[in-house]
Image (cartoon, rainbow, N blue to C red):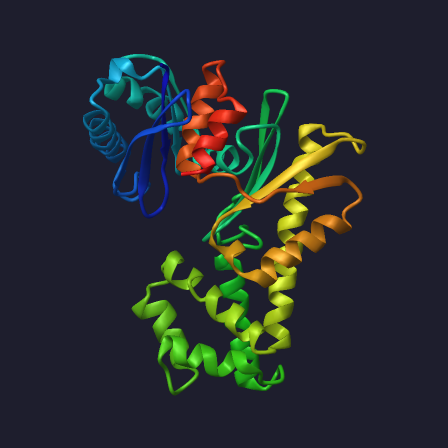
Amino acid sequence: MARYLGVDGGGSKTAFVLLDDAGRVLAEARTASCYYFDEGIELVGRILTEGVSEVCRQAGVTTADIDQAFFGLPGYGEVSSDIVHLDALPRDVLGHDRFSCDNDMVCGWAGSLGAVDGINVISGTGSMTYGERRGRGHRVGGWSELFGDEGSAYWIAARGLNAFTRMSDGRLPRGPLVDLVRARVEITSDLDVIDVVMNRWKGQRGRIADLAKTVVAAAEQGDEVAARILADASGELAEIVEATRVELGFSGDEVVPVSYSGGVFSAEPVRSGFEQAIAALPARYELRTPLLGPAIGAALYAAKRAGSPLSPHALDVLRSR
């Protein structure tokens, strides 16, 4: 029996899954986030040690019994000088070299598509795509909320706040968005939104991104400006998928599997708008409902890197959990 460890890092948590080659989950654990830019790179080693120890304890195995591991780490690849250090940390945790590391975007792709060739688009707080074709991977997007992350929750929220200010000024017709934003941020004077977002929230990325839900609610109540923002978000996400297809070398004749992950896709207007935007592109895409979550995706990718991808039957076992 082969055992594969998957680690999906994220902004709010780190998830660990240990599978066997029959598709059985042997152990799962969650720890705090291993996003290290605020606390330093040593945080990653502490979090990995904690989570790996827990899954081994649950499964009654040692790290030597893990045949292959994949560590999807947030921020991996975004600071070139950190890569060598990040690549070395799992060796100290596992005591062997049967592992690989990459950005956590790979986990979303592997889970959504079952680690087969194709493209996954992520839209949560931020946005990006990751795809693979014939053993080569490529990323598009994820340039940060300051000058990128088009189609993400932060991007939607920032445009929603801009629309709120324009409606308050009378530069746009007032729609349901105005009262919904006032209620959400608990203000009676519209200018107080500056104090809430900039001073009380201190411009925190996650808190601002949560306002995307308010934009969705406004669109559902018939706000035309909010609906336009969501339609634009769908178009932006389709655009980065198309750029990924071109960079990976998919020809116009190939059918490209596409899936999605991230909380923004829980909004039906975005999900349906994305489907329409993909269908309008000249290339041939096959939109697939996500198969599995990113933590299991990380373990699937470990198996693939080991040269022993899980069988269709094993994938069915995982999906039936």
Residue 23 locus on image (x, y percent): 42, 26
Residue 32 locus on image (x, y percent): 25, 43
Q: Decide: is 195 above or below 82.
A: below
Residue 117 locus on image (x, y percent): 61, 28
- Residue 306 seen in this snapshot: yes
Q: Decide: is 21 above or below 277.
A: above
Q: Quadrant where the C terminus lies?
A: top left
Q: Which one is nearer the viewer's eye here, 286 or 24?
A: 24
Q: Residue at x 76, y 39 (%)?
A: 284
> Left or right: where does residue 175 sit relative to residue 65?
right
Q: Residue at x 22, y 19 (%)?
A: 61
Residue 131 locus on image (x, y percent): 59, 33
Q: Residue at x 42, y 81 (%)?
A: 182
Q: Which one is nearer the viewer's eye here, 49 or 117?
A: 117
Q: Decide: is 91 above or below 223.
A: above
Q: How many marks?
A: 0
Quarter-wise, where is residue 289 in the image?
top right
Q: Decide: is 236 above or below 268.
A: above
Q: Which one is nearer the viewer's eye here, 254 or 226?
A: 254
Q: Residue at x 37, y 68 (%)?
A: 198
Q: Quadrant where the N terminus lies?
A: top left
- Residue 78 seen in this snapshot: no
Quarter-wise, where is residue 241 in the image?
top right
Q: Which one is nearer the viewer's eye here, 198 or 178?
A: 178
Quarter-wise, where is residue 176 in the image?
bottom right
